[in-house]
Image (cartoon, rainbow, N blue to C red):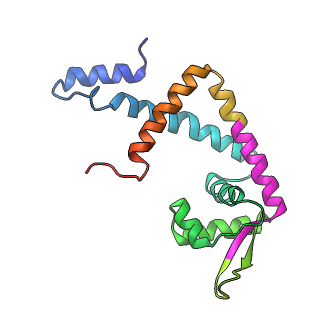
Amino acid sequence: MTDLVDRILAQWGRERPDLDLDRAGMGAVMRMTHLLYRVFNPLGEGALESQGIKQAEFDVMATLRRRGPGQGITPSRLSDELMTSRAGMTKRIDRLEALGYLTRVPSPDDRRSFGVVLTPEGVAAIDAALTAVAGAVGALTARLDDEERGKVDEAMRILMRHFADGSAPH
């Protein structure tokens, strides 16, 4: 059974027979890119939109929620964990604070510093958002049987093991 990527690779094979695109793994990368940008990102964005938050805000709230109740984190640490600029993190924190989803708390170790923690409203909002995202993803992946889901998960685990640090050959 062929798909769009197979047809594209066949066309490149005809036009550039000097390149071994199969050996290069182009098919897998093209399929992942297509699924990420055309299927999974819009799916997640739609689920989050129904909760009134954006992906970047979800990431902040989810990071705080996973830490446990009342566990604060400094904005700079959040920036590092989410790989975003300090200015971008400040903007996210300001918006989430305005929504009543998080609050700034003084640092017990340094009076010049503060942490951020989820409010009870923030906990409820991130729990609802995660439930919406999990439901949307679950509905999509329900098309796969357990064996297929396991194969996809294992393939992604292999890629993560090799590239999780963000390194790629230059």
In the rendered view, would you say 145 is above or below 83? above
Do we see residue 144 in this rendering?
no
Which portion, as a residue range, is magenta?
Answer: 115-134
Side of 38 relative to 136 (left or right)? left
The residue sitting at the top extreme is 1
Q: Residue at x 72, y 35 (%)?
A: 135
Looking at the rendered structure, the number of numbered marks drawn on it comes to 0
Q: Residue at x 67, y 88 (%)?
A: 111
Side of 56 relative to 164 (left or right)? right
Closest to the observer: 18 or 134?
134
Rendered location of residue 105, percent (x, y) = 74, 77
Q: Residue at x 20, y 24 (%)?
A: 15
Side of 100 relative to 10 (left or right)? right
Q: Residue at x 75, y 52 (%)?
A: 126
The N terminus appears in which quarter of the rendering? Answer: top left
Q: Residue 137 sits in which quadrant?
A: top right
- The secondary structure that dominates the magenta segment is helix
Side of 161 relative to 59 (left or right)? left
In the rendered view, would you say 162 is above or below 106? above
In the rendered view, would you say 103 is above or below 44? below
The residue sitting at the left extreme is 18
Rendered location of residue 4, percent (x, y) = 41, 21
Rendered location of residue 50, percent (x, y) = 75, 44
Q: Residue 96 sits in which quadrant?
A: bottom right
Rendered location of residue 159, percent (x, y) = 42, 39
Do we see residue 132 in this rendering?
yes
| Residue 132 lies in the magenta stretch | yes
Q: Residue 117 sits in which quadrant?
A: bottom right
